[in-house]
Amino acid sequence: MEDAADQATCSAVILAGGLNSRMGGRNKAFLKVGGKTILDRLLEALNGLFEEILLVTRRPGIYQGLPDKVKTVRDIFEKRSSLTGIQAGLKHSKTPYAFFVPCDTPFIKPELVDFMCSRIDSSSDVIVPAFEDHYEPLCAIYSKRCLPYIEDQLRRDDFKIIHFFDKINLKQIPLKELKKTDPSLRSFFNVNTPETYRESLDLVKPSL
């Protein structure tokens, strides 16, 4: 890609299909952090980088009033999982690549997303942050070429995202490169429990 986040090459997909069980059923996308919902914070970060933004959900009716460029789409496979959302996002996307992010990440940095999109090339099927002992597959870029492998897994009720990584061309982005655009790596902070929600509120408090 000549331009980071080439809008003809890559879309953004927000995964909002979870049960929110660890939050007592509260929809994480609508939790407020720093006076804005997590979803609004995400859209602000993504809006200038992508022409197409999809939101994958099983309840599109609750996401009213989104910006015109944001399109809600439904899961295609019945069983609920993050891999199901990735499949739906890739299937509905108009572009050959899609950057995926969950709806519970209030601190995603546009600079980090832009950097990741700049690493897209024609031979890479997945571009994924690689920490010391694990990947971050829910803040990663996937090619439509992954769809046959993902759909094969879903038909076998195998929902572990990384299980198809050995079948495709994987590009890993190491920690030291990610820190150039997000030194604290706060982009990967997830609000998925009441405890992490309280922590997110502390993170946006002005220092005295």
Image (cartoon, rainbow, N blue to C red):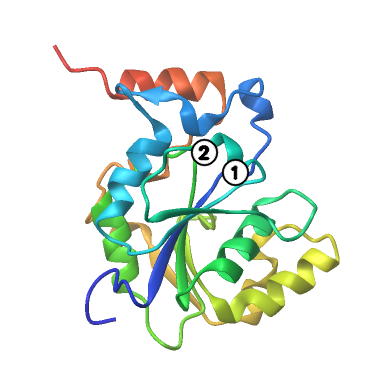
- Location of residue 174 by image quarter: bottom left
Look at the image and tell me whether residue 179 can be seen. Answer: no
Residue positioned 71% across, 58% down in the render:
160
The answer to whether 6 appears left or right of 136 in the picture is left
Q: Which residue is mark 1?
A: 60
- Location of residue 159 by image quarter: bottom right
Please state the horizontal and vertical placement of residue 6, each as a whole percent of the image. Answer: 29, 74
- Assign the N terminus to one quadrant of the image: bottom left
Q: Dot 2, how many residues are within 10 Å of its Cα: few (below 14), some (14-19), or many (20+)?
A: some
Please state the horizontal and vertical placement of residue 207, each as a whole percent of the image. Answer: 17, 17
The answer to whether 186 appears left or right of 142 in the picture is left
Q: Mark on residue 63?
A: 2
Please state the horizontal and vertical placement of residue 193, each as a whole percent of the image. Answer: 57, 25
- Assign the C terminus to one quadrant of the image: top left
Which sits in the foreground, 174 or 32? 32
Residue type pointed to by label 1: Pro
